[in-house]
Image (cartoon, coloured by chain):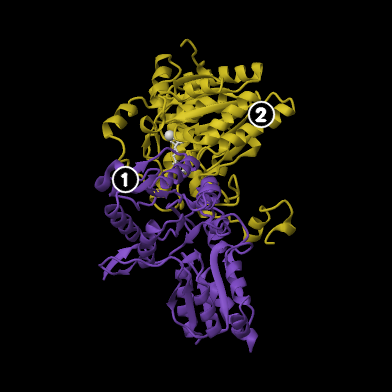
Amino acid sequence: MDFTFNSAQAHAALTLMLTIRLFESKIESLFSSHIMHGTTHLAIGQEAVHAGVSPALDREDWIVTTHRCHGHTLAKGASLKAAFAEFFGYSDGLAHGLGGSMHLVDVEHHNAGSSAVVGSGVPLATGMALQLKRKKSNQLVVALFGDGASSRGAVHESMNIASVMSLPVLFLCEHNMYGMSACAKDMVSVEYISDRGNAYAIESTVVDGNDVEQVYKAVSDAAHYIRSTGKPYLLETRTYRFSGHSKSDKRVYRTREEEVAWLKRDPIEMLKQRMLQRTYIDEKDFEKLGQNIQCEIDNIVDEMIDHPRQLSIEEAFSYVYSSKEHGQL
Amino acid sequence: MKKISCREAIREALFEEMARDQDVVLIGEDLGCYGGCFQVTAGLIERFGTHQVIETPVSEEAIVGVAVGAAMMGMRPIVEIMYGDFSTLASDPLINHAAKMRFLSAGKLSVPLVYRTPMGSGTGAAAQHTQSLESVFTNIPGLKIVYPSTPYDLKGLLKSAVRDPDPVLFFEHKLYGVEDLIPEEEYLIEIGKGDIKRQGADVSIITYGKTVFTAMEAARLLEADEISAEVLDVRTLRPLDTDLILQSVSKTGRAVVVHEAPTFGGFAGEIVATIVGDRRAFGALKVSVERVCGLEMPTPFNKHLELALQPSVERIVDTVTHMFTSSV
Ligand SMILES: Cc1ncc(C[n+]2csc(CCOP(=O)(O)OP(=O)(O)O)c2C)c(N)n1
Ligand SMILES: [Mg+2]
């Protein structure tokens, strides 16, 4: 692969990936100290996919995410503050505290949010693309889904619909080897989910999801293909979540050896090494960058914990229907 | 007697039924070494192997459909769906097929299926993981719907559900850690029979699932106000133990129906109709029947809002107290 980031692109990607990693690590510590409630799905280890997808799109392109949505949400432009506030359930959160970790929505940045029903976001993304096409827009929609979600009928049905109707959808499979405890080897009938494209006459390819330059290039190419042909595209990124499935996961379904092997391919470390080699940064810059981001995150959270802002039940009712009179029936 | 949690009670029922009959097969996602989303099935794959514990891809519509087909061929499948909210995906095989197979084959085919899934809020899992969707299914002839509360009821009713020749939807609340005493020896509880969880003379609080515990707590508080509340756990929604409800209300003359699902179109409406449609119970009523149910809103993530949504001890106590002040 001859595509490489220039210095500015590499810096932007590294900053984004570190921000996502530190954001999620903070979330993890807030959950383990019981400051946050509910559940959360971390994607530590998958940052190259986050930093390779949205930055390769046009600002006006839409994404539809999954339950594992923090990284994509930040990469598409959400502010750290609004994201953290949503985790706290505060009224200045992305969804005013109504959605929480699994439902980060950010319409301003063309992020339609996630379905917590695995795979159900894919038909919605397909429908969004249908209306964009009717309006002769140049925008496309990215339908994110996991290896587990790839077994949902609605995902297959959506690919068929997008193909026969020629819809501007980028089906983007974030293959992290497992759906909860279920190993893709045991659950998915093909080795490469990108091969599903053949069944629906959709062009497809697979890339190393831990290599942010590869993901970025593949998404740019796919977006170009979709815009110039009007057809959908299927891109599979192969990666691994270092974290457990959710906060309570003891990871009994995989070996420590397997985890260690993947840790050697840490996407942030991979990019950092390349940047050192290309003398885009030195060790000191890297350390400084991490410290700055950590500092920003700590400040935001400290301030937030001290200032809880909650929606009232009346305000919450006002979001059930378009008209307030219909709320509470 | 022995002390056991709701989780263990369900697991014991599964264990005993699977040991009794090799055609009793668990089907669902992550219920092997992971032990299921709520750790209910932990240890079962080690004991029964993949012959009786089948782990599936994320394909709710198909796995429930597959279970219906297998049941038609003599399997006794127990499907676990991680969250009741995903019952929307399983609704076609359940509503259009499982419920109608016996009828459409004029009795030649049957679907002895158990569909287990947890419902309800309180976990901070927000709008798509906390719903109480029982009334989506109670309107379907051909389905039986069970929604127990205590470890004793969970075990006895699940064992009966497995042996039932018709499809049984077995809804579980998420207080899996709640403990109680159950007998050492084997027992069954008949589907379709309610249970008086607390005797009382002045008001009948009629409920099921998690809110049985809320109602019990409310009844304890009401005692201090010298109001004797009866708590009736219907345990089965379809077929409903109307006799027990009518008996209780005819005795107390006051009825409050409680559930987590929103009021509008909820199952409480069926219970109210049962009461007011009966001459004797209707005649015994001293005040209008009340409902204390979930508010008309998807479950918010914010903890305080989520709590405000549910029928609380306080709301039940207030409602009951008001029935007394307004009737004198
Ligand atoms: C329809 C549905 N079934 C089951 C679940 C429970 N669940 C949550 S995440 C998950 C695994 C999804 O795997 P994958 O699509 O690979 O995404 P990943 O978690 O690996 O990011 C499951 C089964 C769900 N949320 N929705
Ligand atoms: Mg996965």
- Describe residue B30's horizontal placement relative to residue B279 as left or right: left
Secondary structure type for disc 1: helix
Q: Which chain is purple?
A: B
Q: x, y (%) of residue B178?
A: 37, 64
- Describe residue B265's horizontal placement relative to residue B184 as left or right: right
Find residue A101 and name its label.
none
Residue B41 in the image: above or below residue A232: below
Disc 1 versus disc 2: distance between alpha carbons?
A: 50 Å
Q: Amino acid at mark 2?
A: Glu
Look at 68% across and 55% down and name the residue there. A318
Q: Chain of mark 2?
A: A
Q: x, y (%) of residue A325?
A: 74, 59
Does the beta carbon of the residue at mark 1 sit less than 8 Å from ligand 1?
no
- Describe residue A282's horizontal placement relative to residue B95 as left or right: left
- Describe residue B49's horizontal placement relative to residue B151 as left or right: left
Would you call the spot at circle 1 few (<14 residues within 10 Å), some (14-19), or many (20 or more)?
many
Q: In this figure, which residue is indicated by the disc labeled 2?
A: A60
Q: Amino acid at mark 1?
A: Gln
Residue B245 in the image: above or below residue A179: below
Location of residue B17 (image quadrant): bottom left
For the residue pair B100 and A213, the one nearer the viewer reads as B100
Q: Which chain is yellow?
A: A
